Image: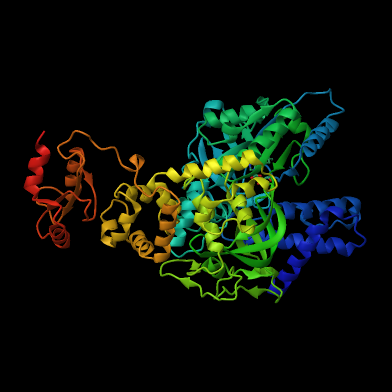
Amino acid sequence: MYSKNEERELLRKTEQMVAEARDQKAPDERDDLDKLRDILRYHEWKYYVKNEPVIPDPDYDSLFQLLKSWEEKKPDWITADSPTQRVGSDLSADFPTVQHLVPMLSLGNASSEEDLQQFSDQIKRLLKDETQQDFDFVSEPKYDGSSLALLYENDLLVRAATRGNGIEGDDITNNVRTLKTVPLRVPFSKYGVQRAELRAEALIPLDDFQKLNEEREKQGLTTFANPRNAAAGGLRMKDPAEASRRGIEVIVYQLGFLTDPQNNDLLKDFELHSDTLELLDKLGFKSSFEDHRVHSGLEDLAAHMKEWEAKRSDYPYEIDGMVVKVNQLEIQRKTGSTSHHPRWAIAYKFKAKQATSKLLKVDYQVGKIGTITPVAKIQAVPLAGVTISSVSLHNEEFIRSKDIRIGDRVLVERAGDVIPYIVKPLTEFRNGEQEIINFPEYCPVNDTEEQVNLVKLEDEAAWRCPRCVCGKQDLQKMIFFVSKDAMDMAGLGKSLIERFYRLDMVKRIPDLYRLDYEKVSRLEGFGEKSAANLKKAVEESKNRPLRRLLYSLGIHHLGKRASAIIAAEVDEVWDLKNWEEEDYLQLKDIGPVLAKNMVGYFSDDHNLNLLRELEELDINLKSTAQDKPTERKDGPLSGKSILFTGSLGKFSRKEAQKMAEEAGARNISAVSSKLDILVAGEKAGSKLKKAKELGTVEIMTEDEFVELVERT
Ligand code: IVH
């Protein structure tokens, strides 16, 4: 349909037009309108036919509005094929075409309180010749899926169609019949209804959408950019079983047509839109009834819009705004529709969650264990209420798989509170100036003369700097060390550490305990009192339980839980110097990767020196009462440590450990002078040998152990 070159050119023009859309005056020439129409047609094709929009909806909307305003100023220049003269079409050749009973129109847009005011004023103006009538508004979520028309006759679903061009749609009844939220039989006849056409949205709940994409990724299939595309595509599958598998749900939001067997309009019997929603609910449809609200004033309406925008990310479905409708059906009929949208309804659009921007350059950040994270610096764009100028690129593989290049126009998304990410580069924009991102070979944050090669461990996505010579890893280590779940130094956070670091007041973790508070009190923003408070927080942190200290060290893969499990097993940190991988592996929930890292950490002099320094600074390295699970004080094995080795005959090792615990003993996993009892089963090996050599360990058989614990 379009060549690559044409697409590139159209996108370049789009960008320019979007940027200038707000300041555009009336067009000078007929040609300007033609060019804008070409741009809009191209995006309609991308959106409806290819299901691959390349610009965010608000950009399209603003260009559409621009064309409309131009055409209003120059009505002679309107052409029959202008995008404004029809509603968008998603018709495809694969399904039979059917006529909707009532045209499926679009909606006008609002994005501020003023827009809502204008909308309301306009309705009042339209009604001015009538006896002044009061009206209310109803608001409902604007579901961001794919629209459908459902036709019921004599209580049965007889047809389901896509919106198509608004007049005609694709007949996708067989696919829709597989969707469990669409009742195939509905007791309309109880209400005297013979024929009903309903407007609905097909959607995939966000949770299911995520699972769907994960599943597809596992199967090596391409993932969907959003639930809307997945639902729209699903409804158009040739195989209804595939449509059914995508977890599509259907939510009804409007009763469009309702007649009795004599073809009399029954909608006239309803006074309010909210009453029709109640009926839909009663009839068993999933509908906007659940989340609709009636507003008697604009103030209440505007506040409600803000409330929903704020909680948008908690909603289980993707919504891109709210639809505001006049509640009184009579007023709806009186105000009528343009060829594009009803005058009695408007879409209040939330701020876009997607935006496009240009990738200017890639910066790199180093983490506490040397992980190098590439970060894209992009031209600042507003996105869902904040301005974004940098976005993580995660790792080399992320850049490769998405083929992201410097100079690319990229689609950025920020869903809810989630940190922004790059959805994809818009390759149509490439003009030959884009540069491939070559991941650095040497540590990119290191500003010293010495070059350090980056390394990548097997099974890991990240490159790491294995030997920091510039101190930046120590900075990250300090930031982590003081954090809330680690040593928890109140008042000492990332920015303050960075400030102390820049001032050469702290360079490594032990320096945190050597702060010159005299100097601190003289810093801007500090005084004697705040310096004293800081000192208090730092001093207090010296007595944290061992599990917190272990966690604070930032050992790769060592989380809070594993830190607690390990701390419960030792008397002091130095015990870990003698631990081997298999000692760790005996502990519940500790896997081989962590075991290896732990042994690696405690056999590195650099780390042991750090611990020695901390010990000299009076930081607690011993396990405390908080590190030990509560032990029974009066059991036959109270106060004893115990270890099982070899294969046991009567019990599994877990059962035996549990029995020992119940008898007051503490299970430990290594043979050392701290071990009191070793229970040796069959084929006991090196542990038994070591215990014998030590001479201080009581060695017993399984039977002897049982006899001991059964003693009361
Ligand atoms: S009412 C004549 N209500 O928004 C009635 N539409 O731009 C016009 N949509 O494709 C639509 N949620 O599929 C209405 N609660 C809602 C809606 C809703 C989503 C979609 C609809 C249409 C688009 C209108």
Question: In this view of the protein, can residue 238 be seen by the observer?
Answer: yes
Which of these two is toward me, 59 or 657?
Answer: 657
Q: Is residue 271 left or right of residue 596?
A: right
Look at the image and tell me in which quarter the C terminus lies. top left
Residue 326 visible to the viewer:
no
Q: Residue at 55% x, 38% y: name it.
A: 153
- Quadrant into which the N terminus falls: bottom right
x and y, in percent, of residue 517 in the image: 60, 47
Image x and y of residue 643, in percent: 19, 51
Counting from the top left corner in percent of width and height, residue 573 is at: 35, 53
Q: In the image shown, does 250 or 445 lie closer to the viewer?
A: 445
237 to the left or right of 218: right
Figure disc tally: 0
Residue in the picture at 80% in, 58% down:
19
Vertically, is 134 above or below 11? Answer: above
Q: Residue at x 56, y 67 (%)?
A: 470
Q: Quadrant of residue 324?
A: top right
Looking at the image, residue 255 lies above or below residue 393: above
Of the pair 32 and 302, the residue shown nearer to us = 302
Residue sitting at x 50%, y 34%: 186
Q: Seen in the image, is 583 located left or right of residue 660? A: right
Question: Which colour style is shown?
Answer: rainbow
Question: Percent x, y for residue 43?
Answer: 71, 60
**Residue projecting furthest to the front:** 518
Q: Nearer the viewer, residue 59 or 49?
A: 59
Q: Point out the quarter of the image occupied by ligand 1.
A: top right
Indicate left or right for 576 with 343 as reference: left
